[in-house]
């Protein structure tokens, strides 16, 4: 069964997507959707990254909770900054964060976290993965921001992936 359906969720998703894109459900469209659902996952298998070494599920739960809290607080900060921009314009700035993370899965998770948290934008990763350039919507103190970023996101990701 694993050889026929190496990625059953991907196959199911492809089949459902195909049916949603079709204006009518004819036997031919059902057959073609099933064929795509069976053929595409093995063809896409080389593109799928290997699973990452996730350790410490409790640390994952803490990180997800921290990111959730940070998303809400950052959204409020950005809204406050936009609404009070005439009195006090936000001081957007680029920040370079030195990184200890090297694992590609951890860096991908860090990229997603940075993208999800309002007010921060992932701009550039050094070719040797030693530093990350971010743009921060309203930067008050660069050293404090870097320390907060490393403690809040990088340290838990190191604990989870390395």
Image (tube, rainbow, N blue to C red):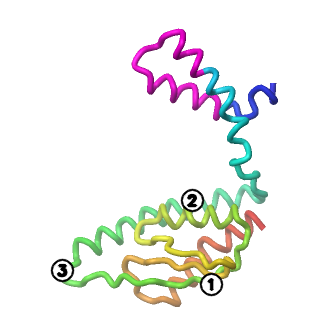
Residue drawn at x 51%, y 87% is 144
In this rendering, is residue 128 above or below 24? below
Instruction: Identify residue for label 1.
Output: 98
In this rendering, is residue 135 above or below 52? below
**Nearer to us: label 2 or label 3:** 3
Q: Is 31 inside the magenta-drawn segment?
A: yes
Q: Nearer the viewer, residue 27 or 17?
A: 27
Instruction: Identify residue for label 3.
Output: 86
Q: CA distance from mark 2 to mark 3?
A: 33 Å
Q: In the picture, residue 118 is in which quadrant?
A: bottom left
Q: How many marks?
A: 3
Extreme top residue here?
Answer: 27
Q: Is residue 153 left or right of residue 89?
A: right
Residue drawn at x 52%, y 16% is 29
Secondary structure beneath disc 2? helix
Mark nearer the N terminus (1 vs 3): 3
In this rendering, is residue 118 above or below 3? below
Secondary structure beneath disc 3? loop
Q: Is 114 inside the magenta-drawn segment?
A: no
Q: Nearer the viewer, residue 82 or 115?
A: 115
Residue drawn at x 69%, y 61% is 105
Instruction: Identify residue for label 2.
Output: 65
Q: Nearer the viewer, residue 84 or 126?
A: 126
């Amino acid at each position: 069964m694993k050889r026929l359906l190496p990625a059953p969720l991907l196959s199911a998703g492809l089949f459902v997507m195909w049916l949603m894109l079709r204006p009518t459900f004819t036997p031919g469209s059902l057959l073609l959707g099933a064929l795509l659902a069976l053929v595409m996952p093995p063809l896409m298998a080389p593109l799928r990254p290997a699973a990452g070494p996730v350790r410490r599920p409790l640390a994952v739960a803490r990180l997800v909770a921290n990111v959730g809290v940070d998303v809400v607080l950052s959204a409020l900060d950005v809204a406050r900054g936009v609404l009070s921009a005439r009195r006090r314009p936000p001081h957007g700035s680029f920040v370079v964060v030195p990184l200890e993370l090297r694992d590609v899965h951890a860096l991908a998770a860090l990229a997603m976290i940075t993208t999800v948290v309002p007010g921060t934008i992932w701009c550039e990763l050094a070719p040797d993965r030693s530093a990350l350039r971010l743009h921060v919507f309203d930067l008050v103190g660069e050293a404090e921001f870097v320390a907060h970023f490393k403690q809040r996101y990088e340290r838990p990701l190191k604990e989870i992936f390395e």
